[in-house]
Image: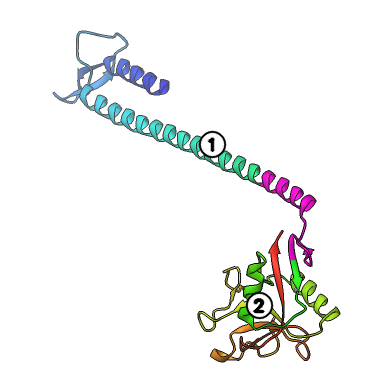
Amino acid sequence: MLLVCLVLVVFAIGCQGRRAVPDDGGSEEKCVCNPVVNVGSPPCNYDGHMADLQTVLIAQQAHITRLQNNSKGSESLLAEQKKITDSLKERVEQLEERIMSKDAVITCPARYELFKGTCYRFSTDQKPFNESQHTCNEEGGRLATVKTNETHNFLTNHVRATTKAHTWIGLSDVETEGLWVWDDGTVLVGDGIWGTNEPNGGTRENCVHFYHGVYNYRWNDVPCARSYFYICEIQG
């Protein structure tokens, strides 16, 4: 801003120092520099110079305004980003505290076993899928959801060591054919751990179990009315 003001002053003085003098070649006048400033006479082409300076001044002011707005926008953005970062850090710390405290105090109901923060019970009786669901619900849980390879391996290793038989898990497409949904209401993500060419039962086979035998406890869809062992889970 200071630079613009200096330009205006110098330009104005320079114009006032120019006088209109006759041209040797004719009657037209030229503007020449006169070292003596004559305040009483108007500067040469005053209006034109002032218009040019006003245009420059307006452009400079607009540029400064843009810079100020950009600066304010950047400051606001940085402040918002810092706020979000601080909030996320706080949430992470809270989750870490909860995880530590959970690991320290998690206890499972009788006959349930703890694995990765979840309690599992392996049945010793066999029931149809719906009755197995009902039994787990009455105990405050649901049929087991198997969303990781770790969980799959833990559960199937236990079945191998005990019943060595077909065992229900909490996965079915009863509501919509081909849309496999876990008992917790979430949809199956990815390919699943199916046996070869499974699932293949169409509308006749809507419930899933660990297949004992040729599939080596990988998943298989069968009619829900069959009676198998089952696994209940309760969140720790």
Q: Is residue 107 magenta?
A: yes
Q: Residue at x 72, y 58 (%)?
A: 236
Residue 150 position, x and y percent, is: 77, 70
Q: Label 2 crowding class (10 Å Cα cut-off): few <14, some 14-19, many 20+? A: many
Q: Which residues are magenta?
A: 92-119
Describe the element under mark 2 as helix, strand or loop.
helix
Left or right, 86 with reference to 4: right
* Camera sees residue 48: yes
* N-terminal label among 1 and 2: 1
Q: Amino acid at mark 2?
A: Ser
Alpha-carbon span between mark 1 and mark 2: 54 Å
> x, y percentage for residue 44?
22, 20
Residue shown at the point (60%, 91%) measured from the top left: 201
- Residue at the spot of label 1: 79
Which label is found at residue 132?
2
Secondary structure of the residue carrying tag 1 is helix
Residue 26 vs residue 71: left or right?
left
Please provide percent x and percent y for residue 108. Answer: 76, 60
Q: Residue at left 70%, top 68%?
A: 233
Q: Nearer the viewer, residue 36 or 47?
A: 47
Q: Quadrant of residue 32?
A: top left
Tell whether 38 sits left or right of 180: left
